[in-house]
Image: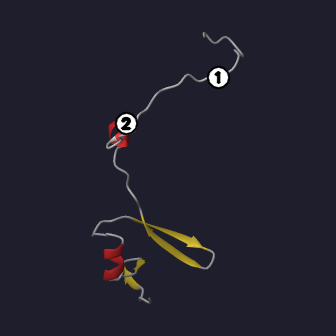
Amino acid sequence: MTVKLRSVGNSMTITIPRDVVKLYNLTQGSEVSIEAVNDGILVKPVEHHQDVTVRSLFAGYTGDYKPTEVDWGDKRGNEIW
């Protein structure tokens, strides 16, 4: 797909076509990264991760966890075991 560059102040802009906006769930104010690559320019959405908690990581976990002892080997310093 081809789009034209437009001048805004001292910068150039491109318009992202509607189907691409929908495909990547972009909205006004969405952040994208712009990177120079060997044969062109790569523009891709920036993913913002929500705060992750232990509860959120294990939400829906239904397995049967049984902790086991781990042998870390012999002492090598002044560890208190």
Horizontal side of 51 relative to 41 (left or right) equals left
Q: Residue at x 41, y 62 (%)?
A: 46
Q: Where does the N terminus fall, quadrant-wise?
A: bottom left
- Choose top left, top right, bottom left or bottom right for residue 69: top right
Q: Position of residue 74 (x, y in %)?
A: 71, 16
The three-letter amino acid code for the residue at tag 2 is Val
Residue 1 higher or lower than 70, as above or below = below
Q: Position of residue 34 (x, y in %)?
A: 48, 69
Q: Which residue is mark 1?
A: 72
Q: Residue at x 59, y 73 (%)?
A: 37
Q: Which residue is mark 2?
A: 54
Mark 2: secondary structure:
helix
Q: Position of residue 67 (x, y in %)?
A: 48, 26
**Separation of residues labelled 1 and 2 (CA atoms):** 25 Å
> Who is closer to the viewer here, 38 or 56?
56
The three-letter amino acid code for the residue at tag 1 is Trp
- Choose top left, top right, bottom left or bottom right for residue 31: bottom left
Q: Where does the C terminus fall, quadrant-wise?
A: top right
Mark 1: secondary structure:
loop
Outermost residue on the left side: it is 28
